Amino acid sequence: MRRSDWKAVLDVVGPASLEHLESLPDRPVYPRGDRAEVMAAVDRELPATGVDAATVVADLAREVGPYVTAVASGRFFGFVMGGLHPAAWGAEILVSTWDQNAGLYAPTPGVAAAEEVAARWILELVGLPAESSVGFVTGGQMATFTCLAAARHEVLRAVGWDVEAEGLIGAPPLTVVLKTGVHSTVPRALRYLGLGERAARRVACDDEDRMRPDALDELLRTVTGPTIVVVESGNVNTGAFDHFSAVADVVDAHRARGNPTWVHVDGAVMLLAAAAPSFDDRTRGVDRMDSWSTDGHKLLNVAYDCGIAICRNAAAHRAAMSVQASYLEQGGDVRDAMDWNPEFSRRARALGVYATLRSLGREGVVELVERTSAMARRFADQLAASGQAEVVNDVVSNQVLVRWLAPDGDHGALVDEVMARIRAEGTAFFSGTSYRGERLMRISVSDWATDEDDVDRTVAALLRHAAAATG
Ligand SMILES: Cc1ncc(COP(=O)(O)O)c(C=O)c1O
């Protein structure tokens, strides 16, 4: 076998990685430089003759490094991007080093076993049925896609239609029910599945973007036949949890009227809350649903990318996803990841889940849920007390919606101004949203590293920028 100078590469990448990670508490959260500057740093002709690997990596670290956003900083509050747990980081290095194609057990037994254990741990942690199947996919989007593919299989199977074999042309009608405040990845999954974004029926929400069970009941009484309902554990804007028990009761009544029904929970933001007894009132009944999607790379702080698709009905999950090929080595008493996710070849992304869960333990996960939510509450309390801003949502988890109060009444413009100023300064990173037609600032606390000092420093900077922006 030809040899390579791995050490020369590690000698570059090790110190560069460490320098980045150790700089996280102090470096600007957002880099400077417009697109032209960033492109100029990396844009070069494809070389006719190669460049040695260590030089390439050293150049990448030097040229791209200055334009990297500190997503794993304790003061990155944008979108719903999680940080990086040290155990996840270490596991990711092993994943890249071992270069396992973890679609099948046979060629990659070590990582396949670790992924199987990670799957079991997730079920135990969140309190989901032990017989559930788990697929590790690229993110919440693909986790929802995977679960809804299983749902499509099962509700059509119940009326005698094999959707995997026959497709949707000529299939019995299938009704998908979403709430008005649904995350955009759900209709997108419906698009991939041939179920149509616009065909879905919409149920009204309350003012925290929770599905109204009475409205669901009213709508389901007009529906007959195969039905899929999607609810949410952690709304992207409000952080709210749907009323799972009430939804489950309504759906049970719909089933009792003879309609095969599957309920999916989009838990990208906060499925993990079900691990915390202090969230019992909010998550009660979540285990009565049929499938659950969540992310490793959000609150669990596994490295990008990692999503998790869970189905109570493993047979439906497998029927929707599995694939056979004569040249593969499949089956037997082992877990082949290919049976549970849409990819064929794949990286062993659940190693990061295994490592993070083992490092945190159950107590650590509970603490993560509670701490991030407490930090969100700390933000909300301080901003509300300032008189310069209003908190729009009921802060029940790790998401806060903020209205900056502009003397001229143009609150939306002030939201953008404050976010731009603090981003340019580098103190913190926020992103906005349009909620009920109003431009608001979102605060998402999804990083294990965020502490009281991060919140207090950030609030001080926000108030300073808001004051400066309003003259
Ligand atoms: C509620 C919800 N569902 C799904 C997603 C999509 O997750 P991902 O970006 O991992 O695909 C998000 C992303 O923020 C989300 O907030």
Image (cartoon, rainbow, N blue to C red):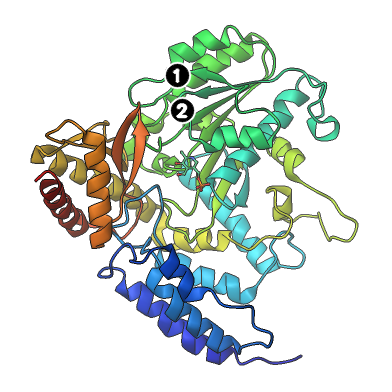
Q: Residue flagged by tag 1: what amino acid is it?
A: Ala
Between 35 and 62, the residue placed more toward the observer is 35
Residue at 67% of width from left, 69% of height from top? 100
On the question of residue 87 being in view, the answer is: no
Between 69 and 448, the residue placed more toward the observer is 69
Give coordinates of residue 78: x percent, y percent. 35, 50
Give coordinates of residue 303: x percent, y percent. 48, 61
Give coordinates of residue 351: x percent, y percent. 56, 63
**Residue 424 falls left or right of residue 36:** left
Residue at 11% of width from left, 34% of height from top? 407
The image quadrant where one finds the N terminus is bottom right
Between 292 and 72, the residue placed more toward the observer is 72
Q: Secondary structure at mark 2?
A: loop
Residue at 25% of width from left, 41% of height from top? 415
**Residue 346 falls left or right of residue 432:** right
Q: Secondary structure at mark 1?
A: helix
Count neighbours of disc 2 (C-alpha within 10 A) and say few if under 14, some if 14 to 19, many if 20 or more: some
Residue 285 tag number: 2
In primary-sequence order, the first of circles 1 and 2 is 1
Count neighbours of disc 1 (C-alpha within 10 A) and say few if under 14, some if 14 to 19, many if 20 or more: some
**Residue 469 falls left or right of residue 151:** left
Up-down relation of residue 331 to residue 234 (above or below): below
Up-down relation of residue 411 to residue 356 (above or below): above
Q: Residue flagged by tag 2: what amino acid is it?
A: Gly
Instruction: Write down the residue under mark 1.
Output: 246
Number of labelled discs?
2
Q: Are marks 1 and 2 in contact (CB under 8 Å)?
A: yes
Between 403 and 195, the residue placed more toward the observer is 403
Give coordinates of residue 108: x percent, y percent. 71, 67
